[in-house]
Image (tube, grey):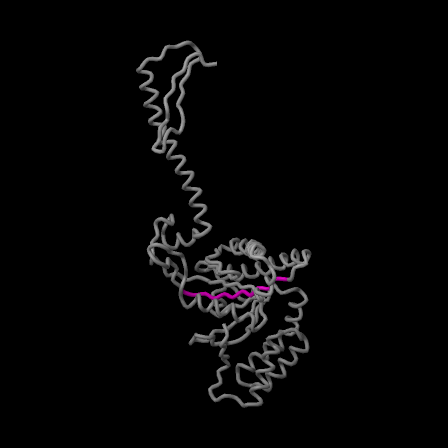
Amino acid sequence: RLRGWIAAPIKARAGVMGILVLGNRTPQTYTSGNLKLVTSLAGQVAPVIESARLTEAQRALAASFARFVPDEFLGALKASSVVEIDTGEHARKKMSVFFSDIRSFTTLVEGKTPEENYRFINEYLSHLEPAIRQRSGFVAEVIGDAIMALFDEGGADDAVLAAIACQEALTLYNKERAREGEPAVVSGFGISTGLLMLGTIGSPERIKCGVIGDTVNTAARVEGLTKLYNAGILISHHTRDELADPDAYTMRPVDRVRAKGKLQAITLYEVMDALPPAELAARMRSRTAYLEGWELYQAGQPGEALVCFANAMNIDPSDRVSRLYLGRCWNLLEHGMPEDWDGIAQVNTK
């Protein structure tokens, strides 16, 4: 129990934030000198407390901003905080760009309330983002039901493995949805690798972090083409060429295309590692016939290629790519081979 005490207010710019009390368990008479000492100590304590509070607030603010502006963006721009970046700052980097989009999204959310739609999107993203993070990628942008993620230079394998993990996560999510009587969610994943510009876009009053460049456009086109081939994961030859060991994946060439708005052709590869076991087994049984047909088609021999694709279809009737090539071969046999045949398909859909 204190028998004597003396106190002074701890003042800050916003007002009194507390009281500094010094006490003694024995009776003691405090002098004006003691009061000056306590007042001086209170004055020295005030900025320390303010600084601690500010640092805590800054940490909370930084954590909050990181949810909107990934730390990876700041690192690429050599900034430690969002307050250090301005409009137009940028960095040129080689990265793997990963796009994902839900198929038939409008049908999935038809009849749902806005609150239910938001809950669905957030649930969906919560299943996919950990797979991206675990492979050293980060979600750069979310546009409705679409995701764009980035993987740093040397991250082609990480991007492909993340897409496989996302497909596996979707399988588990769809089991949850089935128990609730909800339809399955089907997504396409497209990846391309190359140089891009990463930086800030906007006006002095409002800026956002973004990426621009041919690699971004190509990845978006590749993802869009997953619908045409009914493929879960498609990658460009740019990404395949960056893989440490392409043979480590269950992969096949799908097409050589010149996408809408593009001048250069790209070769597309389907990554099949995340297919359901029965479907993957059928693809593997038809693989030899399919690859022979692919080579013959590219060489401008549609008659021989047609036989191979027909054999592949007999083994795996669900393979839309083999069915697509059957149609192309019949069309070439009926109308003749173009003089400038190069095996490249012009794709005019996004």
Vertical order, 61 against 213 (above or below):
above
Asked if the stretch drawn in magenta spans residue 164, the answer is no
Q: Residue furthest top?
A: 27
Taken as a whole, is the magenta stretch helix, strand or loop? strand
> Which residues are drawn in magenta?
184-195
* Viewer-side residue, 137 vs 142: 142
Residue at x 51%, y 81% (from the top left corner) = 343
Horizontal arrangement in the rendering, residue 4 relative to residue 160 (left or right): left
Horizontal arrangement in the rendering, residue 90 relative to residue 241 (left or right): left
Residue at x 69%, y 56% (from the top left corner) = 179
* Viewer-side residue, 317 vs 53: 53
Instruction: Indicate the position of residue 180 as horizontal and vertical percent values.
Output: 67, 56
Residue at x 44%, y 65% (from the top left corner) = 216
Instruction: Indicate the position of residue 318 as horizontal and vertical percent values.
Output: 65, 73
Q: Quadrant of residue 161?
A: bottom right
- How many marks on residues? 0
Instruction: Indicate the position of residue 137 as horizontal and vertical percent values.
Output: 48, 56
Residue at x 50%, y 79% (from the top left corner) = 345
Vertical order, 182 against 334 (above or below):
above
Vertical order, 19 against 94 (above or below):
above
* Viewer-side residue, 321 vs 181: 181
Vertical order, 195 against 316 (above or below):
above
Instruction: Indicate the position of residue 116 as horizontal and vertical percent values.
Output: 59, 55
* Viewer-side residue, 160 vs 66: 66
Asked if the stretch drawn in magenta spans residue 187, the answer is yes
